[in-house]
Amino acid sequence: MMLKPELVKEILQMIGDGEYVGTPLGDLYKHFLNEDIKGASENEFQKFVYHMDELFDAELFKTRNLNAQRRWGKSQSVGGSRSYANVPLVLTPLGGEVLKELNKPKGLERLMQGIRSAGSAAGQEALKYGVKELFRGALGS
C-alpha cells in the first residue's frame, strides 16, 4: 500500500475545518466514500482506513473525547461488518503545522518527495520522512 499525498492533505484539511469543535468522523466517511460506510467498495474503504490509521499513528490528529482503545473511532464488529463511533476529530499542533506547510505552493511536492525518499518504508515511517522533508523545505524557503 502507498500513501497518497493528495488524500493526506484532503483528510487533514477536512479535519482542520472543524477547528476546536472537531469534524465528525461520519462527515469524513460520507465525503471520502461517497455513500454509507457499509456500501463503499472494500478497496475504497480500506484505502480510507489505511490513511486514517497512518495519520493517527503519526499523531497528526486525535479525537476530542474518545479513549485510546477505540483509536480514531473506527470499529469492527465480531462478524466483520463496518461501524464507527461518530466522534469529533481535531488536528494536533503537529497536524496543524503539517497542513499549513501542505497549503504552501510546493508543500505537496515536498511531502511526495519525502515519502518517495523513504523507499520501502511503509505508511507511518514514509509519512514521517515526508513530514520531515516538508519542514526542511519550509526552513529553506
Image (cartoon, rainbow, N blue to C red):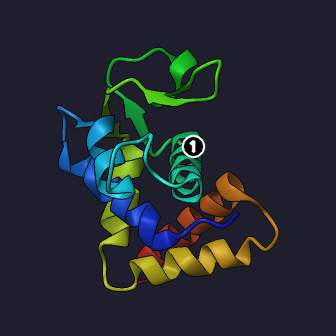
Q: Position of residue 122 (x, y in %)?
A: 75, 59
Q: Position of residue 86 (x, y in %)?
A: 32, 27
**Residue at x-position 47% and y-position 14%:** 67
Instruction: Bin the neighbour count of mark 1 within 10 Å (Cα to Cα): few under 14, some 14-19, many 20 and up.
Output: some
Mark yes or no: residue 136 visible: no
When asked about the image quadrant of residue 25, the answer is top left
Residue closest to the far right:
120
From the viewer's perspective, tell me whether residue 118 is left or right of residue 67.
Answer: right
> Position of 1 compared to 87: left or right?
right
In the displayed structure, 140 sits above or below 66; it is below
Total numbered circles: 1
Q: Residue at x 54, y 53 (%)?
A: 51
Judged from the image, the secondary structure of the residue bearing numbered disc 1 is helix
Answer with left or right where residue 23 lies relative to residue 80.
left
Q: Is residue 73 left or right of residue 93?
A: right
Give the residue displayed 43% in from the left and 78% down from the top: 108
Q: Foreground: 60 or 94?
A: 60
The one nearer the camera, 50 or 111, is 50
- The answer to whether residue 18 is seen in the rendering is yes
Query: What amino acid does circle 1 point to?
Result: Asp
Position of the N terminus by quadrant: bottom right
The foreground one among 108 and 85 is 85
In the rendered image, the quadrant that contains the C terminus is bottom left
**Residue that mark 1 sits on:** 53
- Residue 100 image offset from top left, x and y in percent: 30, 64
Residue at the spot 67% in from the left edge and 57% down from the top edge: 123
Q: Image height check: is 107 above or below 88? A: below
Q: Quadrant of residue 19?
A: top left
